[in-house]
Image (cartoon, rainbow, N blue to C red):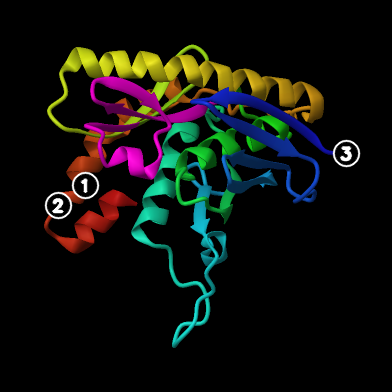
Amino acid sequence: MAYSVSVDIGGRALSIETGAVAKQADGAAWVRYGDTVVLVTAVASREEADKDFFPLLVEYREKSYAAGRIPGGFFKREGRPTEKETISARMMDRPVRPLFPAGFKNEVQIVATVLSSDQENDSDVLGIIGESAALCMSDIPFPEPVSAVRVGRIEGNLRINPTFSELDDSDMDIVVVGTSSNIVMVEGSCKEVLERDLLEAMKFAHRHIVSINEIQNELVRQAGRPKRSYIPPPDLTEIKNDVRSMFLAETVEAITIPDKVKRQEMMA
């Protein structure tokens, strides 16, 4: 069964759909803004990875057919990610990575695919909205929605999600990402903008972010799955501090011994 929610952002409808495609993913979101469409899927392993870091992979790809083109000539297939795709993938990674539970080490893969581009609305912010919706609807432990908007300023007036042509006349181009209570990431560039104007732009952005988060919560109520049980690892800070205090000095002394045989004996 398909579910859909929408909200007006900057005079254009932003809609998020789920349930029609990518049904085998743990979570999937079909995000449309204007005639730009991005499909985002999220999948997590059931077993914890044997790694000392959180193995999150985020991929963002813009297909040539999204703009009505087919690769031809010598290269007849999609090539490696462009600089724009790499930057967009990193921009999707940064706001969600710290929100996963502490100690969560299951492998998570998030893939955003631009299926249609109207050549006016940038799809990078849609990727962030889509990954949040996919994670929140899935059984992957993820706490709350995050949303992203782009803010421009044209002739002193703030503009939410300006088009590519509008950005040519804008002295501000920032992407703001946030939860309903906080801003978690700001990225972009400005042309000698005053600090108070930048702060006002962030507040302006957050009001729209809250609206998008609300429709994400509504979609979760309609189509969300129960979250899988997750028991965080025990806090070993005290044990680590005890081991460090007992053996750190000896270890440092051991690795600085010039004689190889004595050094190995000391290390053993």
Numbered mark located on residue 254 in the image = 1
Marks 1 & 2, CB-CB < 8 Å contact: yes
Name the image quarter holding the N terminus.
top right
Which residue is under mark 3? Answer: 1
- Does 73 appear in magenta? no
Q: Nearer the viewer, residue 202 or 185?
A: 202
Range shown magenta:
146-174
Q: Which three-letter amino acid code belongs to the residue tagged 3?
A: Met
**Residue at 59% in and 38% down:** 130
Secondary-structure class at tag 1: helix
- Tell me, yes or no, whether the highlighted magenta stretch contains residue 160: yes
Residue 35 lies, in percent from the top left, at 58, 46
Q: Residue at x 77, y 29 (%)?
A: 224
Residue annotated with mark 2? 257
**Residue 98: in sight, yes or no?**
no
Q: CA distance from mark 3 to mark 2?
A: 68 Å
Rendering quarter of residue 198: top left
